[in-house]
């Protein structure tokens, strides 16, 4: 047997025994393996429960009623009284078109009325209407007939020539023709003075001139373009003094006051329990701290694709089913402390449980 190394003997003698390792606990590992999945399942269950009774979408935007404002008459703009962003009241003057051409039209109409009235007076005093010419013509007929009878009597006794007889006969014919012409002139003058059924008691020429004046006066009033409702001015960059305005062509947009609502596009699978009147909650990307209450005002009659300019055609063999979205109008309750701007993005949550209508 080999002898121990004398150099290692003291080291071996002074060495301390190594501590034994602690026994492992397998139950801890098994516990963690069970607890972690259970916690995840419980968290998912609680999240699922929290989502019951409500549906949400972030495909929602602020909408406001807008009115395109145009002028009913044309002409250069003479004065502009508003600009983009101004708040206006119903009936407030927005801009004015040069009124001078329409004032001239009124003056021309007044002159036409005066001329028509003068014609009426002249016709009323005309011999053609009074019957003076007819009386004179009838008197001539009587004289011509009496002369004819005398000439005829003389001719029968042989004291008159055939030429005198024919001249007397022709004078009677001419006198009677003058009576007929005078009567025709009287009827024509009476017709010019007569009033039609459309304007009883008024000469047609006078009525036409007065109608022209009324049209010019209306056009003059329309040179002042006023706000049709209360709201805020937008897209007024074309309102410049001297700019030519075309009738009925919009020159600015008015965003109506108190017309704000939310248009939320919900998936068709979210509509099963949705109904008009249910409560809604609205959050705004622009105002993270602002939360407004609302109600479902209406549910669209068709999907967004159905009312698009080019509806989808699914008759081909390349059809792929896509979840459709239906526009839902959300009415905002109360007054917002922040200004709501059309087009801003929002997130809408509708509470679809039975108690959401209360």
Image (cartoon, helix red, strand yellow):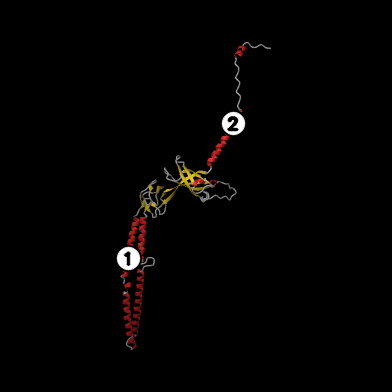
Q: Which element is circle 2 on?
A: helix
For residue 202, which quarter of the picture? bottom left
Q: Earlier in the sequence, mark 1 or mark 2?
A: 2
Q: Which element is circle 1 on?
A: helix
Foreground label between 1 and 2: 2
Which is nearer the eye, 127 or 351?
351
| 274 over 180 or under it: above or below | above
| Structural crowding at the residue carrying mark 1, measured as other residues with C-alpha within 10 Å and reported as few (<14), some (14–19) or many (≥20) | some
Tell me the residue that label 1 is attached to.
117
User: How many numbered tags mark residues here?
Assistant: 2
Q: Residue at x 35, y 74 (%)?
A: 183
Tell me the residue that label 2 is attached to.
31
Q: Residue at x 58, y 35 (%)?
A: 38
Question: Percent x, y for residue 292?
Answer: 45, 43
**Quarter of the figure with the N terminus:** top right
Question: Percent x, y for residue 116?
Answer: 33, 65
Q: Residue at x 34, y 59 (%)?
A: 106
| Structural crowding at the residue carrying mark 2, measured as other residues with C-alpha within 10 Å and reported as few (<14), some (14–19) or many (≥20) | few
Which is nearer the eye, 107 or 219?
219
Seen from this angle, which residue lies furthest bottom?
A: 157
Which is nearer the eye, 98 or 62?
62
Is 184 left or right of 14, judged from the image as shown?
left
Question: Percent x, y for residue 209?
Answer: 35, 63
Calculate the distance from the C-alpha at mark 1 to the C-alpha at mark 2.
112 Å
For residue 156, which quarter of the picture? bottom left
Seen from this angle, which residue lies furthest right?
A: 1
Q: Residue at x 36, y 60 (%)?
A: 214
| 124 over 285 or under it: above or below | below
Question: Percent x, y for residue 125?
Answer: 30, 70
């Amino acid at each position: 047997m080999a002898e121990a190394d004398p150099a290692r003997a003291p080291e071996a003698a002074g060495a301390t025994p190594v501590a034994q390792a602690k026994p492992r606990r397998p139950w801890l590992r098994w516990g963690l393996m069970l607890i972690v999945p259970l916690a995840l399942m419980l968290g998912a269950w609680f999240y699922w429960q929290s989502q019951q009774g409500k549906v949400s979408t972030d495909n929602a935007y602020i909408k406001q009623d807008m009115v395109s404002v145009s002028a009913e008459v044309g002409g250069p703009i003479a004065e502009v009284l508003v600009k983009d962003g101004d708040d206006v009241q119903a009936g407030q003057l927005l801009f004015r078109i040069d009124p001078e051409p329409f004032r001239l039209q009124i003056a021309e109409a007044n002159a036409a009325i005066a001329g028509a009235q003068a014609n009426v007076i002249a016709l009323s005093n005309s011999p053609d209407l009074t019957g003076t010419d007819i009386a004179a013509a009838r008197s001539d007929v009587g004289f011509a007939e009496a002369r004819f009878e005398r000439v005829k009597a003389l001719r029968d006794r042989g004291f008159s020539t055939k030429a005198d007889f024919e001249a007397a006969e022709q004078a009677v014919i001419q006198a009677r023709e003058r009576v007929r012409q005078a009567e025709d002139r009287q009827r024509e003058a009476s017709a010019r003075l007569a009033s039609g059924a459309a304007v009883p008691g008024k000469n047609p020429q006078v009525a036409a001139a007065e109608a022209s004046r009324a049209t010019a006066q209306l056009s003059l009033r329309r040179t002042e373009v006023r706000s049709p409702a209360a709201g805020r001015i937008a897209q007024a960059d074309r309102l410049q003094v001297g700019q030519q305005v075309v009738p009925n062509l919009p020159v600015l947009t008015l965003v109506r006051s108190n017309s704000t609502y939310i248009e939320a596009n919900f998936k068709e699978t979210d509509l099963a329990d949705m109904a008009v009147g249910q409560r809604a909650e609205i959050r705004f990307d622009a105002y993270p701290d602002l939360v407004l209450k609302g109600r479902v005002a209406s549910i669209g009659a068709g999907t967004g694709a159905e009312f698009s300019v080019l509806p989808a055609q699914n008759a081909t063999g390349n059809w792929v089913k896509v979840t459709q979205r239906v526009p839902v109008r959300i009415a905002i309750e109360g007054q917002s402390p922040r200004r709501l701007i059309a087009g801003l993005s929002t997130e809408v949550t509708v509470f679809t449980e039975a108690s959401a209508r209360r």
